[in-house]
């Protein structure tokens, strides 16, 4: 198997595990990603669309679904009426924190069959990739981001 093939299958393993965790919270992966992205502070919809690799229209539809679930809310910016801020509701904050904890606890299970040295190496490499990616909060706004595809609305 070529390196690209291995990365492809690794992405499938990660996406499947993530989807399983999200399903335990009765959320689609896109819904879970949205509430986790705004769990700590409000985010501008335009910036969030860029970060998640979504069109503004697709993000708006996703936000509509998650708003109907009572998990996020929209608010205008006092400085610019064109800016829409997203934040979790109190119920959304509780769910987002529980979900994020589950993700951080259970997603590493994908490496559970590795020996302890390989697990440390995997963690180090994954950390380096995440820290240097354009999606890292330490870096500037991404110019290219992965797309997030929402499953059926709930």
Image (cartoon, rainbow, N blue to C red):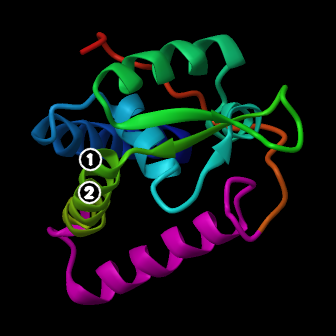
Which quadrant is the C terminus positioned in?
Answer: top left
User: CB of mark 1 within 8 Å of CB of mark 2?
Assistant: yes
Q: Nearer the viewer, residue 109 or 83?
A: 83
Q: Residues within 10 Å of mark 2 (few under 14, many from 20)?
A: few
Of helix, strand and loop, which one carries label 1? helix
In the rendered image of this protein, does residue 26 appear above or below residue 132? above
Rendering coords of residue 49 (x, y %):
68, 31
Rendering coords of residue 27 (x, y %):
24, 31
What residue range appears in magenta?
111-138
Q: Nearer the viewer, residue 112 or 21?
A: 21
In the rendered image of this protein, does residue 94 appear above or below residue 34? below
Residue 134's tag is none
Query: Where on the picture, by quarter, is residue 137?
Result: bottom right
**Badge 1 is on which residue?**
91
Residue lying at the far bottom in this picture: please name it. 117
Query: Where on the picture, by quarter, is residue 129?
Result: bottom right
Tell me if residue 116 is in the magenta stretch. yes
Q: Nearer the viewer, residue 27 or 91?
A: 91
Q: Identify the residue at horizontal 23%, vertical 40% (top origin).
A: 22
Of helix, strand and loop, which one carries label 2? helix
Which quadrant is the N terminus positioned in?
Answer: top left
In the rendered image of this protein, does residue 32 appear above or below residue 132? above
**Badge 2 is on which residue?**
94
Q: Nearer the viewer, residue 57 or 107?
A: 57
Q: CA distance from mark 1 to mark 2?
A: 5 Å
> Does the magenta stretch mainly form a helix, a strand or a loop?
helix
93 sits left or right of 76 in the view? left
User: Can residue 1 be seen?
Assistant: no
93 sits left or right of 148 in the view? left
């Amino acid at each position: 198997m070529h390196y690209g093939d291995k990365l492809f299958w690794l992405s499938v393993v990660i996406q499947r595990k993530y989807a399983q965790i999200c399903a335990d919270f009765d959320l689609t992966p896109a819904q879970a990603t949205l509430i986790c992205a705004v769990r700590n502070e409000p985010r501008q919809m335009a910036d969030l669309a860029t970060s998640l690799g979504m069109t503004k229209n697709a993000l708006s539809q996703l936000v509509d679904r998650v708003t109907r679930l009572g998990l996020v809310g929209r608010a205008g910016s006092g400085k610019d009426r064109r800016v829409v801020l997203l934040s979790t509701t109190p119920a959304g904050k509780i769910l987002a924190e529980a979900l994020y904890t589950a993700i951080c606890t259970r997603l590493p299970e994908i490496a559970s069959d590795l020996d302890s040295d390989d697990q440390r190496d995997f963690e180090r490499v994954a950390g380096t990739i995440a820290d240097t990616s354009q999606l890292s909060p330490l870096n500037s706004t991404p110019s290219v981001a992965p797309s997030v595809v929402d499953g059926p609305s709930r």
